[in-house]
Amino acid sequence: MLYTGRDYVAITGKHRIHIPQDSIHALFEKFEAARFFATFDNYSGGGTDGPTYIVRVSFDDRRKVVRDYQGRMSNMPDELTELERAIDAAAGMQVWVRGQGDTVAALTAEHWDFDANSDENSKILKAAKLRGDTALVNKLTENGQDHITPEDRMFMTPKMP
């Protein structure tokens, strides 16, 4: 699964997420229950600045993409909302969107370069500071990168000798 975080999320950028096989089977049942392949391709409601969900699935010879931008405001079926939530739960999306759970472990699992002096790391560091995620702040700053500000240091817990 590919996650792309842009604005107002804990972790920005593109990240690959592995969903366990047993969860895939459960999700398949939810796709069938939602009659996913019979739904519209686009559900757009009014308003601005809402999240966009894109569900893209392919297996065997079947392919389908559904875009949801505040779709519940445009009579999107409740089963699609439930499917989106089930996908998020199976993928542990709260780690990426809200920074809840073990974000360090999730980034480590995808071989994230915590030491890179990059815009992505700066964005992630800023969001981690705002959330008070000291574990992620410490991981991003543990090797003394030159982009650490005095404000960053106040969120770091002292290292044991």
Image (cartoon, helix red, strand yellow):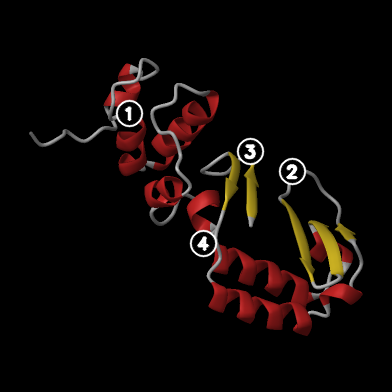
* Element at label 3: loop
C-alpha gap between disc 4 and disc 2: 23 Å
* Element at label 2: loop
C-alpha gap between disc 4 and disc 1: 25 Å
Given contact means CB atoms under 8 Å apart, are the residues at marks 4 and 1 in contact?
A: no
Given contact means CB atoms under 8 Å apart, are the residues at marks 4 and 3 in contact?
A: no
To which residue does mark 2 refer?
Answer: 49
- Specify which label sits upstream in the sequence, 4 or 1: 4
To which residue does mark 1 refer?
Answer: 141
* The C terminus - image quarter: top left
Q: Does residue 57 sit above or below 29 in this rendering?
A: above
Which of these two is toward me, 135 or 19? 19
To which residue does mark 3 refer?
Answer: 7
**How far from the left and from the top, in percent, is residue 102?**
38, 54
| Front disc: 3 or 1 | 1
| Front disc: 4 or 2 | 4
